[in-house]
Every structure is written in C-alpha cells, then in structure tokens.
Image (cartoon, rainbow, N blue to C red):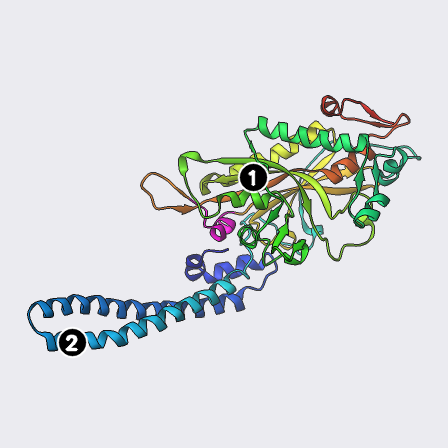
Amino acid sequence: MIELSYIRRSPEEVISRLAIKNFDAKPVIDEILAIDEKRRSTQTNLDGILAQLNKASKEIGELYKAGKKAEADALKANTTQWKEDITLLEAETKKIETELHTKAVLLPNMPHSSVPNGKTPEDNEVFHTEGAIPELGENALPHWDLAKKYDIIDFELGVKISGAGFPVYKGKGAKLQRALINYFLDKAHEAGYLEIEPPILINEDSGFGTGQLPDKEGQMYFVGEDKLYLIPTAEVPITNIYRDMVVDASTLPIKNCGYTPCFRREAGSYGKDVRGLNRLHQFDKVEIVQIRMPEESYKALEEMRDYVAGLLRSLNLPFRILKLCGGDMSFASALTFDMEVYSAAQKRWLEVSSVSNFETFQSNRMKLRYKKDKDKPALAHTLNGSALALPRIVASLLENNQDDKGVRIPEVLIPYTKFDYIS
C-alpha cells in the first residue's frame, strides 16, 4: 500500500507513475485526498474538544478545592456535552479512516523509474540471454508425450482424482521432483537463506499483507467454512512471519527460503498454454524472501536475480531474463525480472521464476518496520523470488535432454536422483 503521506505530498507523481502500469489513478487519488482532508478536519475538532475537556477537568478540581462548588458544578455540566461530542467524533473518525483505507488499497504499487513502458508481455525488455538452444531430432516429443512414454507423470490419473491441472508424479518422475526440491533448498542454504516450512493455508490478514487480497481473491482456492486460503506461493506465509513487527536493523538482512506446494485457480486459462505441465492448479516451488533496509534493496534484487540465473545455468538450461514492462507487472511489485527457459520441443520460452522488489508496499500493509539505533521505526523493503518453480523446469529438462536412450539427468541432480537417465 502506498504511504498516505507520499500521496498527500506528491499526488501528481503517484498518478504519473501508476500510468506506467496502465492504471488511471486520478479518480482514486482525488477521492483519497478529499477523504483525508475530511479526516484531518474531524481529527482537529476532536483534538480541540479533548484539549478543552482536559483543561476543564483540571479547573474543576481546583475550583472544588477552592470551595467554589457552584462554579465547579456549572463547568462539570459542560463536560457532559463535550464527552458526547467526543464519542460522536471518534466514531466519525473511525468511519472515515475505514473509508480512506478502502480507497487506498485500490492503488497498485508504483513502478520503479527503470520499468519499461508497455501494455503486454510483448513489450517486456530482454535483459539477458544465455545458453545454446538444443537442436532436437525429427522424432522429438513434447514433455507430455515423454511423460506418458516413460510412465513418470500421469495427467489422466490426476483428472480422475482431482481434475485437470493436478498431475500425478510416478517413479522416476516423483524422484526427479524430490531431487529438484532438495537441490534448490540446498543451494539456498549455501547462499545464506534460512529454511522455513510454513503453513499452506493462510488467513485473510496474511493475504492482505502481501497484496493477494483484495486483488487476487478470485485466483485463490478458498476454504469457506474456516475462512482460509490455500497459498499461491510460499512468499505469502513466509513474508507474513514478520507482520506487525519492528525488527532491529542489526538483524537485517533477513533471508528466508521455503518449499511448499502452491495452489492457483488459473481462472480463464485455456489453449496450448495449459498443456501438460505448462499451467497447473497445484505445483511445487522453492521460494526465497528477503527483508532489507531501503538503501540496500535494489542491490539485493540484483543478487537474487543473479542467484536464480545461477540455478538455471547449473541445470544447463538455456534461459533469458526479462525486465517486465508496466503493463505486465503484478499489483504489488515495484520492479520485476522474469526468468524464462527454452522448451525445445514446444519451441517456446516458458516462465520459471519472477524476482521482485516490493519496496514498502507490502511492509506498509503488514506494518513491518525496522529500527536503527535511536531512530524512529521505518518501513522495511520486502523482496521475493521463485528459486525455482518446478513444473516448467521439469518440462524443459525432459524436452531438452531427450535422446535415443531416454532423458539425460543434469549432472548436478544425479547425487539427488541416484540415476542419470529416465528410460
């Protein structure tokens, strides 16, 4: 959530920066400023009456002590009306603050100054490309056919048990999943991330804190009876560990990682993009999260981006890094880099990671602050990234590494899989 003080101080800048996200903020900003003016006026009236009441209370005591009972009783009678006025103004202030909050949460995060203009994924900026595109033979198969050929992923069985988008991993397919999870977690540990095993169900406060609510409620699975949501990513529960906290600056940076299954309704998805592992309702992912002081957060974003690139490099997957344009960015992000790997049989790039800096947008919603020495607490910056999401990594590994013998396992994974081929 954008800080109200910033909106009040620089409304035109907020409007112009949000226009890069193709969001017309002027009507909302105008409403926010009008409501805020009303709130400040009401608060001024309330403070004035409170000051009168406090002053009168002291005077009443002094009058009684001086034996001036009649004057004291007359002044005391006036305080009755003031107390009623205070009750009404406090209720009005609370109502106005709720209205102000309701409007403020409609605004997405402001994009960083380096975010490219654009409306669609085609407008994203190719930041870096690396690795040779594999040349497959005429008989090369897409990953869904390879999965069936080697009996390692059963999409039809998933439909029987749950529905489309819930595959069943079997044999070496299940072992490959587990190998990737353990490999990614071990690499995160080596990079200084503390492993967290969080809940996969969250409450509404957690969904609001990281920006999924009220923006993406239609994309999350909801357990109505308990009013809980299945997580779309481990970012949500891990970042919310620090909700309503003031952390000591000496403990920063905070670096956490975690593996969880992730759940997304993916409403409206159809066509070739949903074939096989391309788009699922349930998938596994290792996430990295950082809490940083503001002056360090963009350096941290570069480090996280390079860290994810190193994982892809170690798997010998051709990849590219995109800097997302304003129109393709998430509601909460200030700057995002997407990582895509090339799927040789499908002849297309597949997104496998997003690494984002949210600046103070999430921390303002969560009331996550840090305190340095004797300074007042200040909002921290939050960052997160996929390191990595498994489905499209598996799809690319299967397709890119197929040969006449089967599917080769990358060397770094063999100690985890205990086999070097799927055949």
- Distance from Cα at disc 2 to Cα at disc 1: 62 Å
Q: Amino acid at mark 2?
A: Asp
The answer to whether residue 314 is left or right of residue 135 is: left
What residue would you read off at disc 1? 289
Q: Which residue is more in the foreground, 76 or 238?
A: 76
Neighbor class of circle 2 (other Cα within 10 Å; few <14, some 14-19, many 20+) is some
The answer to whether residue 97 is left or right of residue 112 is: left
Q: Which residue is more in the foreground, 367 or 6?
A: 367
Neighbor class of circle 1 (other Cα within 10 Å; few <14, some 14-19, many 20+) is many
The quadrant where residue 20 appears: bottom right
* Image location (x, y in percent) of residue 342: 77, 38
Q: Which residues are magenta?
A: 359-369
Q: Residue at x 14, y 67 (%)?
A: 61
- Say which element carries label 1: strand
The quadrant where residue 282 appears: top right
The C terminus - image quarter: top right
